[in-house]
């Protein structure tokens, strides 16, 4: 393939990605309206794992200001290369030995706090750095062994000690739906997370902050919107598989 053909191929791919992003945005707005919700109450997070900066910049130019990364080191490498008005989300597993690196970055929200010990580690690091760190509690609603996060029963027992941890702002809950063709069960899991947020909000010292539901990916985000999602994590629907 000559250089001109290669460049044209890259440009076509980028245009297609931008078109997918815009189409999903339109679908999100339409579903929010048909569900009786304000479109301003949901955020589309573009999951940019393994995507080059040039492609991300095209999506940025199309209006995206929220990107999600799965890997800490990839996020840290990309952040300085992108505009400063982006809100960055860590949506992948956070290992305790990477906490200090994340706290030194401009990550806006950690979605994947999957244990009390991790929350405590983030709290201690945040106290040392004299900063407030926003987190979501990862709930394993489907109770699958392959997924991280505590079950709702396990988290419920920890709500009081969690709120004793300093320098943390618990902003809501996150879950990953089961990979199944049974969309009724997917809906059930999302609805459970919504009900947990409503229940636990009453036990929070600062219930105003406890508002987010991070749920819904490429295959199920429309269901998630119907069940109250405020943060959608979409990658392959925009970038392809």
Image: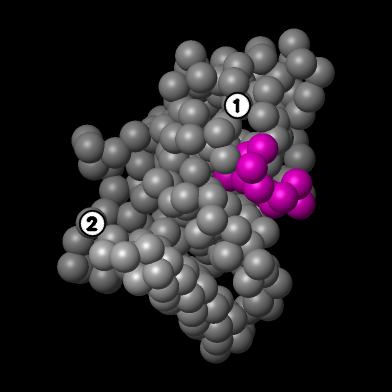
Q: Horizontal and vertical percent for residue 121?
A: 57, 15
Q: Residue furthest left?
A: 181
Other-residue count near label 1 (Cα within 10 Å), few / some / many at <14 / 14–19 / ≥20: many
Q: Nearer the viewer, residue 36 or 124?
A: 124
Q: Nearer the viewer, residue 89 or 178?
A: 89
Other-residue count near label 2 (Cα within 10 Å), few / some / many at <14 / 14–19 / ≥20: few
Q: Which residues are magenta?
A: 79-89
Quadrant where the N terminus is found in the figure: bottom left
Task: Look at the image and tell me whether residue 60 can be seen.
Answer: yes
In this rendering, position of residue 184 left or right of residue 118:
left
Give me the disc on residue 179: 2
User: Which badge, 2 or 1, comes first in the chain's sequence?
Assistant: 1
Give me the disc on residue 102: 1
Q: Horizontal and vertical percent for residue 117?
A: 49, 17
Quadrant where the C terminus is found in the figure: bottom left
Q: Nearer the viewer, residue 69 or 184?
A: 69
Task: Look at the image and tell me whether residue 231 can be seen.
Answer: no
Question: Residue shown at 44%/22% (left/top)?
Answer: 95
Give me the disc on residue 52: none
The quadrant where residue 170 appears: top right
Q: Horizontal and vertical percent for residue 184?
A: 27, 70
């Amino acid at each position: 393939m000559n250089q001109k053909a290669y460049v044209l191929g890259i440009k076509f791919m980028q245009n297609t990605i931008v078109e997918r992003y815009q189409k999903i945005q339109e679908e999100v707005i339409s579903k929010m309206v048909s569900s009786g919700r304000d479109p301003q109450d949901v955020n589309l997070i573009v999951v940019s794992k393994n995507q080059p900066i040039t492609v991300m910049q095209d999506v940025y130019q199309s209006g995206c200001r929220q990107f999600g990364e799965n890997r800490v080191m990839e996020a840290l490498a990309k952040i300085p290369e992108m505009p400063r008005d982006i809100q960055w989300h860590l949506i992948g597993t956070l290992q305790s030995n990477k906490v200090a690196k994340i706290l030194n970055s401009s990550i806006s929200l950690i979605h994947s706090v999957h244990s009390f010990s991790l929350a405590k580690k983030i709290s201690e690091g945040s106290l040392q750095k004299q900063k407030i760190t926003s987190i979501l509690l990862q709930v394993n609603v489907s109770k699958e062994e392959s997924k991280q996060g505590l079950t709702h029963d396990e988290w419920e027992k920890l709500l009081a000690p969690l709120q004793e941890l300093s320098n943390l702002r618990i902003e809501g809950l996150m879950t990953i739906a089961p990979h199944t063709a049974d969309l009724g069960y997917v809906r059930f899991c999302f609805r459970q997370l919504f009900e947990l947020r409503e229940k636990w909000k009453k036990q929070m010292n600062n219930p105003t902050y406890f508002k987010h539901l991070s749920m819904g990916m490429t295959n199920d985000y429309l269901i998630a919107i119907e069940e109250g999602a405020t943060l959608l994590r979409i990658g392959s629907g925009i970038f392809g598989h």
